[in-house]
Amino acid sequence: MILLACAVQAELAFWQPREGVEMLVMGVGPVEAAAAVSDALARREYRLVVNAGLAGAFDDAANIGDGVIVAEDTMELALEDGATIALPRGERVADRAQSDPTLVAHLATAGFPALRGITVARVTSTEATAQRLAALGAQVETMEGFAALRAAQRARVPAIEIRGISNRCGSRERSGWDFGGGIVGLKRVANALFDAALVE
């Protein structure tokens, strides 16, 4: 069984039920995503988690309407100035999670770019914040990706994050927000993932 997880049902309104795929609406934000995916994985065995939804792209990373793979997603779990949090006894902060590399490679071969994501708890709405996050290496911004991937990682279940680009990250006046365009991109990459029998 495959778990197909989105933040809000409207993101997957195009989805036609398929045997062996169960859809989960997680809720918005990293806490809801982590809690929902962890709960689902505790209740039933899945062989793959697919986190699908919309994302904003930083300048030159992708265009509105593109479908992309988020190969690695991170969260800012650090000091305000970006320095690493010093934990006792050499413990480390888990601030990044990866999509399944085999699936990433197959989708990349099919023409979908593999990008670096950053998960945020509030949507970027200024150029200053967009520049700061892009300087960290972020190419797309989501509110659930890292949380969903990390929950799957902790449960030792393979996972992949796919996104349709709905806006440019930065000032809201220049974002070009297009929900429909983002859905077109998401549908393309989702259908490629499932139709190519990559997850059968």
Image (spheres, rainbow, N blue to C red):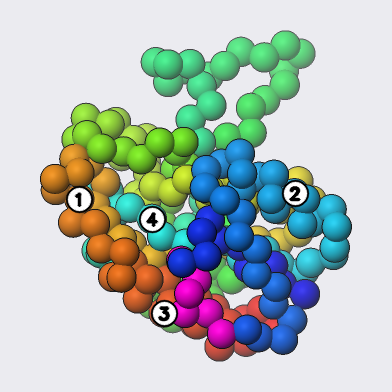
Q: CA distance from mark 4 to mark 2?
A: 22 Å
Residue at point 53% right, 79% down?
15
Q: Residue at x 57, y 16 (%)?
A: 85
Pointer 3: residues within 10 angstroms few (<14), some, or many (20+)?
some
**Residue drawn at (85%, 57%) of the image:** 43
Q: Is residue 111 above or below residue 5?
A: below
Q: In the drawing, does residue 127 fall left or right of residue 6?
A: left
Point out the image quarter for the C terminus. Answer: bottom right
Give the Cα distance between marks 1 and 2.
Answer: 33 Å
Choose the circle earlier in sequence order: 2 or 3.
Answer: 2
User: Type of residue at label 3?
Assistant: Arg
Is 119 above or below relative to 65?
A: above
Q: CA distance from mark 2 to mark 3?
A: 27 Å
Give the residue number, with chain letter if any, for mark 1.
175
Which image quadrant is residue 24 in? bottom right
Which residue appears at 61% of the width and 13% of the height? 86
What residue would you read off at disc 3? 188
Identify the disc placed on residue 38: 2
Element type where label 1 sits in the image: loop
What's the residue type where badge 2 is placed? Answer: Ser
Q: Is residue 69 magenta?
A: no
The crowd level at tag 2 (other Cα within 10 Å; few <14, some 14-19, many 20+) is some
Q: Which mark is residue 55?
A: 4
